[in-house]
Image (cartoon, grey):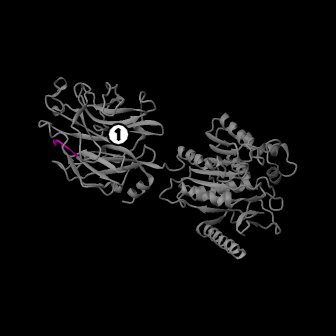
Amino acid sequence: MYKKLFLRIFVLSFFLGIYQQEIQAQSEVIPLWPNGAPSALSAPSYIQESQLDALGNIRGYSKVSQPDITVFLADKETSNGTAVIICPGGGYSHLAIRKEGYKVAEWFNSLGISAFVLKYRMPSDQTMEDKSVGPLQDAQEAVRMVRRNADKWHIDPTKIGIMGFSAGGHLAASLSTLYNEKTYTESDDTSARPDFSILIYPVIGMEAGITHKGSQKNLLGASPTPELLEKFSSEKRINKETPPAFLVHATDDSGVPVENSIAYYLALKEHNVASEMHIYEQGGHGFGLGVGPTNQYWPTACANWLRSHNWIPNEEVLLFSYFKGNGEDGLHLAYSEDGYTWKSLKNDAPFLTPVVGKDKLMRDPCIIKGGDGKYHMVWTVSWTDKGIGYASSEDLIHWSEQQFIPVMAHEQSTRNTWAPELTYDAESNTYLIYWASTIPGKFPKTQSDKDSGYNHRMYYTTTKDFKTFSPTTLLYEPGFNVIDATIQKHEDKFVMFLKDETREPAEKNIKIAHSDKLTGPYSKASDPITGDYWAEGPTAQKIDGKWTVYFDKYIDHTYGAVQSSDLKNWKDISNRIHFPEGTRHGTIFKVPRALYQKLKKQ
C-alpha cells in the first residue's frame, strides 16, 4: 500500500516538475533592470527564496530583489495585439507566482492575449533607498518595456493592460493612478500608463478600516506618514485619465475587505471612467481563477468585458461576399474585425468560378449559414436568364457542384432574375429564396421607359433541401419598381431592407418594410434611410447592438453605410468604412474565428 502511495506521489511530482520546466523552457525570462534597479542598496544577505508545495514544486517566491518578467506570447494567428502584465499577490512579502501568475498567463493566451508575469521586488529597507516606490518602479518599467518591444512581440502599444491579485492588485491600482509619478530616470519618453486594469480582490486603500495591515506595513513601514497613506490609497488618486477597470471581490473576504474594490469602483464612477465590478457572496481571499460555486465564473465575465472593449478578438469574424467587374471571375471574400475596415482574402482572387447560367456570371453573391451547419450561396448568373445559381460549402473553400435553379421558367416573358437572397427560418427549418424580376406588362402603373424599361417586383420560393422548391410567388409589391431586397429577423418580426429603383422622378435609395412572417405580407415601405446619392445592394448586420446597413454607391464607385439603434433614426457613417477597391455588392455574414483563420491561409 505504502509503495503504491509513494509511487503515485513520485509520478505526480515528476510530471508537475516537467510542467514547471516546460514553463521555463517555453517562456523567455527577461531581467527588468539589466544594469541594476534604481536606488538599489547592496544587500548580500537578502537573497531570493523559493516557496515549495508539498511535492517540492515552486509555487512562489519571497525576498525578491532582482525583478524580471516571464513572457507568454499569444499565437499571432489568434491575437489582436492585446497584452496584460500580471502582478501576483502575496502581501508585499512574497509572490504567489504560480496560481496568480503562470496559470493566469496561460488563460490569457487561450483568449489570444499575450501575458507577462512580473516578478516585482519585495519592498525592503535592506535593498532599497525608499521601499515604498520599489514595486511601483518595477511596474512602470514593465509597461514601458512591453510598449518598447511592441513590434518585436506583435503587440498593439495602445492595448497594454495591468492585472493584479491582492497586494498585486494594489500595485496595479497604484500604477493606474501614479503612472506619471517620477520614480526613476527613464531612458526615453515611453508612457507607463496602462490602457486598462484588472483588479482581483485588490488591496486599494492604505488607511485604517479598509487596508490590509500586512501589505501596508511591508510597503510603507510600521509608522507611515499621513502623506504616504494618502499617496498610496489609490481610490483617492483617480481622475478622468485613470484607465478603465474590471474588479472582482468576495463579500466574505476576511483578509482584504470588499470595501477596497467598492471604494475604487465608486471613485471611477464619480469621474466617469468605464468600469465593471463583480462581487460574489462567497469566495474568501485568494481564489485565483475561481474555485467556488459562483466566483469560478469571473474569468468568463472578464473575457466578455475585454471583448466588449475590443481588447480580445470577437469569437466571430465578419465576412463580406462580393463580386468585381461584371462578375465573370467569381466569388470574392473580405473580412472585418469591427465592421468598419474590410480587407480582401486570398489577395482578392476568387474562391469560386461560375460555370452555370446563360452568361456564367457570379454577381450579387449572397451567403448564409443554414440549419445544417453548411454555408448556402445563391447568385445572379446572367443579365437575361430565368434562373439563379446555387452552391453550398462547409468551409467556404470547397464547394458543392453548382446548380441552376429555374425559378422564373414558368413565366416565358420574364426578362431577368437579379440579386437573389437567402433567409433561413429556424422555426420551420425553411429557406426563403427571393429575387427581383421584371415581367413585361405585369405592373403597368409603374412602367417607365427609363432604366431600359425594367419594372421589378420581388418574388420568392421556399425549400428545405435545395432539391425541391415551392411554386414561385410574389413576395412584395410596394407600388414602385423594387429590387435588391434583403430580410433580417429582428426580435419576433422580420425586417426587409430594399432598394426603390424608381428612376423618374429618381429615388434610387434604400427603404425598410416590416412583417410578422418571413413570407409576408410586408408593410408599406418607409421613407429613405440613405442620403442624397444613388444606393443599391443593401446588406445588413447587427454589430455591437446597432443595425448597420451597407450599400453600393454605384454612381460614386464606392461603398456607404448607415447605422441605427432602433431601425427608425439613421446616421450616415460612410466616412468611417473602408472596402477593397472595386468591390461590388454582396452579403455580410458572420463566421467562427477558426474558419476565418483557414480562409486567411488561402
Image spot of residue 602 (x, y percent): 36, 59
Comparing 171 with 461, the one in front is 461
From this view, report whether residue 556 is shown above or below residue 394. above
Which residue is located at x 64 percent, y 63 percent? Answer: 70
Residue 538, visible in the rendered structure: yes
Disc 1 is placed on an element classified as loop
Image spot of residue 449 (x, y percent): 15, 29
The three-letter code of the residue at mark 1 reads Ser
Indicate left or right for 16 with 438 as reference. Answer: right
Name which quarter of the figure residue 276 lies in: top right
From this view, report whether residue 184 is shown above or below residue 587. below
Is 323 contained in the magenta span?
Answer: no
Magenta stretch: dominant SS?
loop
Farthest top residue? 445
Image spot of residue 188 (x, y percent): 64, 55
Indicate left or right for 184 with 382 as reference. Answer: right
What residue does disc 1 label? Answer: 428
Farthest right residue? 223
Farthest bottom residue? 3
Indicate left or right for 256 with 102 as reference. Answer: right
Q: Where does the magenta region start and end?
A: 383-388
